Image (spheres, rainbow, N blue to C red):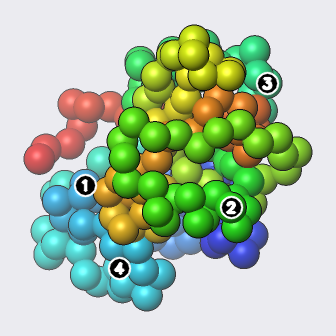
Amino acid sequence: AGSCMGGILYRTFKYIIDETEEGNNCNGIVPEECMPYQADDTVACEDKCSNWIEHLIPLVNYSRWNAEPEDRELIKTEILTKGPVGTSMYVNRDFMTWHMNSHDPDDYYPFLEKRYTNHCVLMLGWKDDPSIGNGGYWICKNSWGPGYGYNGFFNIEYGSLHVDDSSIVTVEYDPDSFNF
């Protein structure tokens, strides 16, 4: 599906669901307990637990839509009913510096308008707050590791850096189909 140099988020799920050789001959992902996340592209797939196939979480489906600012309530519903959603956003030098130095879980990156994206993150919650310009912020998880933000998480004002008006990706799985 690519990388930060040209990856496309929803294509990742195409390969996860694919049970051919191109998709690793199986459908699913391993839980965090089986292969803890490391912010390092050189971690080999062989580093997963030896019985990974027994813990595989198969995906049923995935979907994508191009969200608009008026879709914020729909995004919240998706998070509430299905879990975290993938989204794209624009990362600039200012955001990187802020994300590296902001470790307060109540802090948020303020609104900055951008019209394109260059990075993918997980959106997993929100806080509505009428005292914030756009009415609140999203709670997101980044892939840069626990040294950024607050243990790898960050908050970003609704609409900032194109985070909630770009491609939104959701995944469906059957919770009865796997064991922990």
Q: Amino acid at mark 2?
A: Asp
Q: Amino acid at mark 4?
A: Cys
Which residue is painted at 47% across and 81% down in the image? 41
- For marks 3 and 1, the one nearer the N-term is 1
Q: Which mark is residue 31?
A: 1
Q: Is residue 1 visible?
A: no
Label 2 Cα crowd, 10 Å radius (few <14 / some 14-19 / many 20+): few
- The answer for how far apart the CA atoms under marks 2 and 1 are is 33 Å
Residue mark closest to the camera, 2 vs 4: 2
Task: State yes or no: discs 3 and 4 in contact (Cβ < 8 Å).
Answer: no
Task: State yes or no: discs 2 and 1 in contact (Cβ < 8 Å).
Answer: no
Where's residue 137, x and y in %? 55, 29
Q: Is residue 36 left or right of residue 82?
A: left
**Label 3 secondary element:** loop
- Which residue is labeled 4 in the image? 45
- Which residue is labeled 2 in the image? 94
Using the image as rendered, state which of residue 7 and residue 57 is in the foreground.
Answer: 7
75 lies above or below 106: above
Q: Is residue 96 left or right of residue 34?
A: right
Where's residue 56, x and y in %? 26, 54
- The answer for how far apart the CA atoms under marks 1 and 4 are is 13 Å
Q: Amino acid at mark 1?
A: Pro
> Which part of the image, by quadrant, shows the N terminus?
bottom right
Task: State yes or no: discs 3 and 2 in contact (Cβ < 8 Å).
Answer: no
- Which residue is labeled 3 in the image? 68
Residue mark closest to the camera, 2 vs 1: 2
- For marks 2 and 1, the one nearer the N-term is 1
- For marks 3 and 2, the one nearer the N-term is 3
**Label 1 secondary element:** loop
Where's residue 85, x and y in %? 52, 36
